[in-house]
Image (spheres, rainbow, N blue to C red):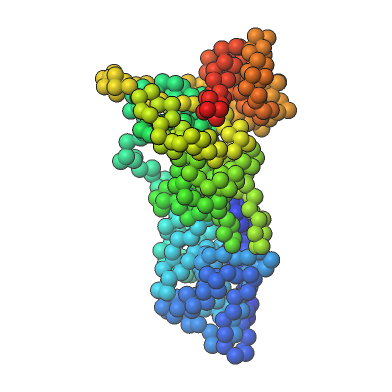
Amino acid sequence: MSFAVINSLGCLGIDAYGVKVEADTDDNFPGFDVVGLPDASVKESRDRVRAAIHNCGFEFPFSKVTINLAPADIRKEGPMYDLPIFMAVLRVTRQLEYVPEGSSFIGELSLSGEVRPVKGVLAMAIEARDLGYKSLFIPRANAAESSVVDGIAIYAVDRVNEIIDHITGRRELSPITPEDFPEKPSDVPPLDFSDVRGQDAPKRALEVAAAGGHNVLLIGPPGSGKSMLAKRLPSILPDMTFEESIQVTKIHSIAGILPRDVQLIRTRPFRSPHHSASSVALAGGGRIPGPGEVSLAHNGVLFLDELPEFDKSALEILRQPLEDHQITISRSSGRITYPCDFQLIAAMNPCQCGYFGHPTRQCTCRSGAVTKYLSKISGPLLDRMDIHVEVPPVEYQELSRKAPSESSRSIRKRVNQARLVQQQRFEGSGISCNARITPAVLHEFCRMTDDANKVLQMAFDRLKLSGRAYDRIVKVARTVADLDGDEIISSPHIMEAIHYRTLDREYWHN
């Protein structure tokens, strides 16, 4: 046989696609070429595969070997094609007489024939099943994430010899199952709102945010507990659905940051990039674009501490993802779209020194410095923050109080009940929570009393709010009403929602 085909897979963004690894030999001058738009790491497969073939007891042919990765119009990235190229060479040289029909292979090879982990295995396992493949051979280190995929036999191996022994019948492998990877209890105690003393107003604001999926801006002096509060938000968010877990795990797998022993990510992500992060780090990118922080926070929380210290161009990139809940990255290699449906939680000081408006400490900023500092955040980005809340310094009496604060479990019960109401309300509409209500159906789902409408009109005229701010006030009021168990939005609900929009106005006009 001078021609052979082996099934493999590749990743393009969050999705996978089938790849045919075609091998051909002829009697021309010896050589080993890989074609089909391979990147540098794929081209280096030639040396890894050649050494692995020798070190596993096989012979590399003394002839011209050409490997084609089809489809040839999609650039191939990463070392995941080592294993299928290895199998194709053995098959085309008849050192392996038989490869089971419907088998597929992914994995990096060491020079000794060890099968090493690669990125994106969960997405590729799902695609292999959808393509109708009967079996998939993967690295042992990627077994946990792929074990949740049913409908296909997945075999995890440490060395290529295990695959050869399985195919030839010398030693049969057993497909992996979810039961092979029981969840391990965490040794780290979860962060809980019971640890937070005082700060009842910010806690309430975060409860509303969790119940409706709203974005939050926390403003307060250093040491007031802004980061402490933000880091505890995931503890009151509703549990992820299975589909949400699959989406998050796929993204983290593609990014190469999924822990080895994790089947599925079942807790909502909490991403907190440093304020020196670039636009590419936040949005994603690279020659073949990978996911950025906004996508790694999908179905979870993106926390930006010291918000004005971020580069302004990086912050402006957030505007479109916050509206569309997806981001499209265009490069010469093509366009890739990643999901990024996240809650944005931002924290900032009111000024450069941090003590503007502090009850006991004097602000040392020069005249005009406060306005200059706050102007680093554009009005359009500020409009996309549903809730703005002040986090004041905590009084000594609150810090020394021995009575425990309300726990995350208690708050979460109310959040789950509010989310259940929203699920029933939005059933069949494609809307997941109040923060995702579209303008077209805003009045249908957010009915108000006459008094509430009058209060909102007064606030709109007095504060000169934008149309986007109007929509967000109504959505937040809808969430407040859901927490209170009311179907109609009344004036107290509107007033609380307005309170969450006026805080920043106080700072911006000083």
Residue 9: image quadrant is bottom right
Give left or right: position of 467 versus 177: right
Who is closer to the viewer here, 71 or 436? 436
Q: Is residue 490 left or right of residue 306?
A: right
Q: In this rendering, is residue 481 above or below 138? A: above
Residue 407 percent coordinates (x, y): 37, 24
Is residue 81 at all visible to an observer of this figure? yes
Check the image and name the residue furthest to the front: 367
Residue farthest along the top direction in this orientation: 451
Tell me which residue sits at (50%, 58%) in the image: 119
Which residue sits furthest right? 440
Front residue (pair 192, 330): 330
Q: Is residue 134 visible?
A: no
Reply above or below: 81 against 443.
below
Which residue shows up at 66% across the image and 32% down it?
430
Q: Position of residue 197 (x, y in %)?
A: 34, 24
The spot of residue 312 in percent (x, y) is 56, 45
Quadrant showing the N terminus:
bottom right
- Report x, y in % for residue 353: 41, 37
Residue 371 in the image: above or below residue 288: above
Left or right placement of residue 304 versus residue 406 in this view: right
Q: Nearer the viewer, residue 398 or 251?
A: 398
Total marks in image: 0
Q: Residue at x 61, y 35 (%)?
A: 379
Q: Residue at x 54, y 88 (%)?
A: 62
